[in-house]
Image (spheres, helix red, strand yellow):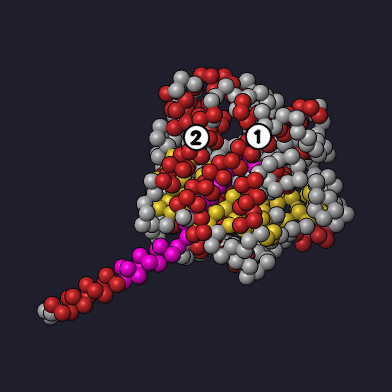
Amino acid sequence: MPTITRRAALATIACGAASAQTASAQTKKRPNILLLFPDQLRPDWVLTKMEVHTPNLEKLRKRGMNFTNAVVASPLCAPSRACLASGKEYDRCGARGNDSDYPLEQTTYYKLLRDSGYHVMGCGKLDLHKKSSFWGLDGKRLLPEWGFSDGIDNEGKMDAISSGAVEPKGPYMALLHKRGLAATHVTDMKSRKNYEGTFPTPLPDDVYCDNWIGQNGLDLLRRAPKDKPWHLAVNFTGPHNPMDITGSMETTVRGRKFPQPNGNTQFDAAKHVAIRENYTAMVENIDRLVGAFLSELDKRGELDNTLIVFSSDHGEMLGDHDRWAKSVPYQPSVAVPMLAAGPGVKQNETSTALVSVMDLAATFLDYGGVARPSEMDSRSLRPVFEGKTKTHRDILHSGLGSWRMVWDGRHKLITGFIPERGGEVRELLFDHRNDPLENKNLAASETKRVKALMERMPKS
């Protein structure tokens, strides 16, 4: 074997050091990524003309782009988050419903970012093991397998009390048990009947779940390594039902005016307003926490080098069509807000591009300099963010259980869904330009359009 001379060895070391410095410099150039992800937020409650005050989201909008045609690949917690994590459409994401756990053999964009050198963090309601109601008291049980470097995975609102009333199974109920507030919280949540209970929670502000999640996110950020780019996903539990708000949140929203639901026959006007006030209080509290993250980034000098995205896992019917929560193909359920700001993102712009929340997986990989796996359905939004194109997709899909949906930005075709009123129908076709509230089914009169859209329908 040839002998390596001292000069050659020194040259090799110098070359290696230079390569390491170059790699380190490239790593530092990669932006940080902050995903702020409430649970069950419909798009018309953000940047709206209604009495909903979200000044921090308005700041984010001015710094970036507001997407008005964003939908989720599935309007239910576990499958929607599985679609985001995997970058796949509903039928390929591995989680068909809330009785599913994310398949550990399937990679996530979190893992791909972590393996490329990112410090990947997550907190709040990750919902990737919805079937298995045990989070670990520190909330770290499956974080490494999913691709996280650090984090706290906690229970959702109803998961918390159903699993941890007597003995905690996750970090949030562990906190309440430690503070002597668990029984009080369980009694309060069970008394609410989901939407009808609009009275304030007895919990103090510091252990109100979204406030605790926000603090966890800030703590994670503050202990992140200084020599790596980071990705942080903050998954709030609000504004998901029940409509629990703290006393301080309640004082800010009473006496406001809101439009009544579209086509509801259930509650009187006063009850609907009270429900919408509570929903608004949760949204505004999340906006306050968004402001805390923006301030933290500014203080750290990272605001200009952080890609920030605000969106949600699905919408909320809020009584429209006599429906509540999610899981249906109506627009308040499948549509979500989406705001993006950061390096290279066009500022103070509104985009009508058709985008899926699932597209964030490829987007974050793109900004992180990581190749998108060929098996992903996700498409990077970076060209739209940077103004290189105004279009993204020509059709959007969503599905859950037996129903499937396609939407071209104007016409929406739904199959396999039985409306609350009107009996069983074969297809639903809505024209959003002339009927944005989706009250008139045109399927029988526009058979050619139904046929054309049916050819774009995903196969269940």
The magenta-colored residue range is: 19-41
Where on the picture, by quarter, is residue 412?
bottom right
Q: Residue at point 70% right, 40% down?
A: 52
Read off the residue under disc 2. Answer: 212
State the residue in front, 320 or 237. Answer: 237
Quarter placement of the N terminus: bottom left
SS type, badge 2: helix
Asked whether residue 91 appears in the rendered view, the answer is no
Q: Is residue 24 magenta?
A: yes
x%, y% of residue 225? 36, 52
Asked whether residue 58 appears in the rendered view, the answer is yes
Where 67 falls versus 223 (above or below)?
A: below
Q: Is residue 136 magenta?
A: no
x%, y% of residue 446? 85, 57
Where on the picture, by quarter, is residue 328?
top right
Where 1 falls versus 392 (above or below)?
A: below
x%, y% of residue 426? 78, 47
Read off the residue under disc 1. Answer: 281
Q: Residue at point 53% right, 25% down?
A: 204
SS type, badge 1: helix
- Label 1 neighbourhood size at 10 Å, few (<14), some (14-19), many (20+)? many
The amino acid on which the numbered mark 2 sits, given as a three-letter code, is Trp
The amino acid on which the numbered mark 1 sits, given as a three-letter code, is Ala
In the drawing, does residue 71 fall left or right of residue 431? left
Q: Residue at point 70% right, 54% down?
A: 68
